[in-house]
Amino acid sequence: MSLGHILRAVWAQPSGSLGVTLVVGHVALALVAPLIVPYDPTAQSAGMILQEPSIFHPFGADRLGRDVLSRAMLGGREAMLIATLSTLAAMVWGTALGLYVALVGGRTDAYAMRIVDALMSIPWVLTVMIFVAALGVGAMALIPVLGFSYGLSVVYIARAAALDFVARDFVQAAQARGERRGTILWREILPSVRDTLAVQGAMQWSWILLGVSSLSFLGLGVAPPASDWGLMIADGRGVMQSAPWAVLWPMAMLSSLIVGVNLAADAFAQALGVDHVPGVAVP
Amino acid sequence: MLRLILGRLGAAWITLLVIAVVVFVGVEVMPGDACTAHLGRDAVREDVLANCRKRMGLNQPPVQRFVSWAGGVVQGDLGVSMKRERPIVDIVLPRLRNTLILAGAAALAGVPLAILLGFLCGLARERAFDVGASTIALVAMTMPEFVVASLLILIFSIWLGWSTGVVTAAYDAPALTLLFATPLPAITLALVYVAHILRMVRSSVIETMGAEFVLMARMKGVPERRIVLRHLLPNAILPSISLIGLTLAWLLSGVVIVESVFNYPGIGRLAVNAVADRDLPLVQAIALLFGLFYVLTTLSSDLVAMALNPRLRTQRG
């Protein structure tokens, strides 16, 4: 099936077109936001503190008098960049290890999966925390840790997907031909599991984005005074009573992006014929 | 049967040992150690650093330190906190109790509700009830805990004024006081996994409805009620039990965030504070406890599944 066919099949579903629209809109906004924001997102103004939404400030102002619209427009950029790079890292190492142990099997497989299982038992928040506690680093330094801890579930999924194929004739034939393992993984198994992994990658991206936002919320991710949705929600929580707009807009932005990714991933899974229960996390 | 259980227990011990090694090595391979993290800028002063390392026993080789650390853990000694300068066990135990109260409330209220809703959704497949509940579940799964928590505070404590937004109870408050403080944190915690379990049970029910023994029962003229309660219910829920255990174990990541948002005096908030204080021995101990909780939860759900499902007992573990 060509890419055009797939896209048309996705677009034909109402949830698919909604999801794709949301994701494309968010990505486009993140790319052009710095050029079109109406105000400086970090400019504080004493006269504007907790001001209600108005024509000049449609989303109101926060507790430091900063324009919420400008901050909400910029708030996804850093988190999305971190999520993209972490997802790439997670998919690459998770797929490589998962496919490898599926092909090799036996003891290597058993030992590797036991270690992966033990690593998965430590909540990812704590893995990140140990890292931050030891190094005291900023948001971009989180990429290897996030890539590592979210890659663990990719190992499971890649392995499970590959196990369906290792016993098939075309893989057996390649082994009988004396192909090297690397070649078999790259030429025979990877193309067979590509669709499953693509859908998984999209889900991973949305989970990591949530993770980064949660970390920023806890004060362990994007550092103030940068604009970030998680940070904005943390910042506005104390004044929710008098200025609910300071938390509701970043919430709406974050949620619409995540829901969009989930709907789009679901529609792609259906179009590709991938067996996928939407939103069921295997973190 | 006994061999199966013993095998499962053995596997749990091995997992725990691997977790302990991973936590220890993870801290070990990073640049710096507990002392440089704790002292921060003061770590440039050689004498202060050397003193601290000597006090913490960091001047010994790693293997020896792991053995003494792990040996202490087995005897219930988790080490000494750097910042608080007290035995970690004394700090952790009361907060662990509080977290168990919160997680217990969330699980006891959430799991039966999730199974019931999932079952009803499966029966009402594709009808209004199913579509509504499944859509809400999907949205609930995509919302991060800190957003749900902030929304609940905004709606229930600020707009409606039904409850207090943050928990004010101290860590050594009586259990009942804490239990009364749990509704909002417990709902936040429960929402995500109720959604997961609901979807799992729903697809399991739909799958079972297509099974031949259900068709057979229908053809024999067994009353629909009896089919649902005796044939469908056990066969649809049993396979979900170990998955429910796994879902509950994931609940712990949520605990860290939910406790911070609601200022709940449990082990999750302690973890955040320990990180802020850069108190590595305490962070290490908490990571190990989370691992222990995960192992115990998955182990007990596997054993419950074995007890209820005769088919699992004959399989070779």
Image: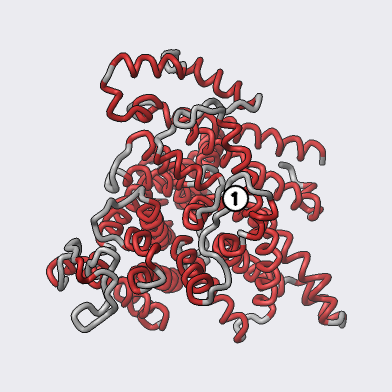
In the rendered image, the residue lying farthest to the left is A35
Q: Is residue B249 visible?
A: yes
Quarter containing the C terminus of chain B: top right
Q: What kind of colouring is applied to the model shown?
A: secondary structure
Quarter containing the N terminus of chain B: top right
Q: Is residue A168 visible?
A: no
**Tag 1 secondary structure:** helix
Nearer the observer, B45 or B186 = B45
The residue singled out by tag 1 in the image is B249
User: Residue A161: x and y, percent?
Assistant: 49, 54
Nearer the observer, B216 or A121 = A121
User: Residue A95: x and y, percent?
Assistant: 40, 48
* Residue under the image location 41 percent in, 83 percent down: A14
* Residue under the image location 56 percent in, 47 percent down: B266
In the rendered image, the residue lying farthest to the bottom is B128
User: Residue A8: x and y, percent?
Assistant: 34, 79
* Residue under the image location 29 percent in, 25 percent down: B42
